[in-house]
Image (tube, rainbow, N blue to C red):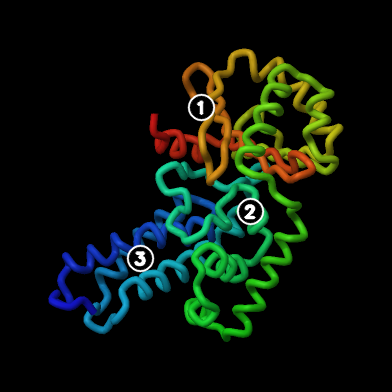
Amino acid sequence: MHAGAHPDTLDQATKDFLSARPRLFGIAYRVLGSAAEAEDVVQETWLRWQNTDRTKVLEPAAFLTTVATRLAINLAQSARVRRESYVGPWLPEPVDTTEDPQLGAERAEALEMAVLLLLEKLNPVERTAYVLREAFDYPYGRVSEILETSEANARQLVSRARRHLAAERRERVTPAAHRRLLEVFLSAARTGDLSVLEDVLTADVVSYSDGGGIRGASKIPVIGRSHVSRYLVAFAPRFWPQADVRWVEANGLPAVLVSSGGQAVALLSVDISTEGIDRLMWVMNPAKLAPYVASLHD
């Protein structure tokens, strides 16, 4: 409760909510991989907070976090069903992290596009346990309270998520090295330089194009150095000559925004390990691109 404040004024309730808002969005976004769905969770949390008997709430931030997290889990469970009918590969909706590098968290864990994509393979409760522990540094006791499970089970959930990510990702490179290799890749992709592409891609590289059904986006992932390289070379003459390129930041890492005729057509994010580029992620779905572009600061 707040000393000197009336225990149940809407003004105080608004202050409490706005103070917690970045964290609420950050949790929901990591659990859902969608900024739009995360905003829905935040708005629903606000509505519930308005209709709550706040005189009984001793810790507003803890209460709001619990509500938002459980709403995000419920939405994630229904989103999994919806994504089964998604046309082509599904990628997370990118966010601009220049203003809030951690997106409401103590640490940037579970914010990179590749990590959010890998977390999709976990069930929503496992994913949420990982997010709360690794990104927001909640003690296991608090994680267990939010998830309504035992502390021992909360530890197991986080451990399973860690093992899954460790099995899927190699050792990362520094942001500076990430930028340098992305620059080399971009130059080779634009000129169709097969030998350089083969040099920077790992043997098991995967290229995902999330077009949400629009023309020109591959409806299946392209897998393997040879296939991806040749696909990019064949793609180059049609895609790059009329394209403008802008360096941006997406989900905490350098990325490339590609525009044609003044319209954004793709956001390229890459996952890079010490062995080279492991994943290419092309967000081309206008419903995901438009909000990201609108959020950029010129």
Q: Is residue 25 above or below residue 222?
A: below
For label 2, count other residues whose C-alpha is less than 10 Å away and answer few (under 14), some (14-19) or many (20+). some
> Sequence order check: which comes first, mark 1 or mark 3?
3
- Does residue 112 appear left or right of residue 64 in this picture? right
> Sequence order check: which comes first, mark 1 or mark 2?
2
- Does residue 103 appear left or right of residue 274 in this picture? left
Secondary structure at numbered mark 2: helix
Task: Find residue 273 and report its horizontal and vertical position in percent.
Answer: 73, 45
For label 3, count other residues whose C-alpha is less than 10 Å away and answer few (under 14), some (14-19) or many (20+). many
> Sequence order check: which comes first, mark 2 or mark 3?
3
Residue 221 visible at all: no
Secondary structure at numbered mark 3: helix
Three-letter code, disc 2: Val
Three-letter code, disc 1: Ala
In which quarter of the view is residue 296 placed? top left
Q: Which residue was labeled with disc 1?
A: 264
Q: Which residue was labeled with disc 3?
A: 45
In which quarter of the view is residue 41 placed? bottom left
Residue 148 visible at all: yes
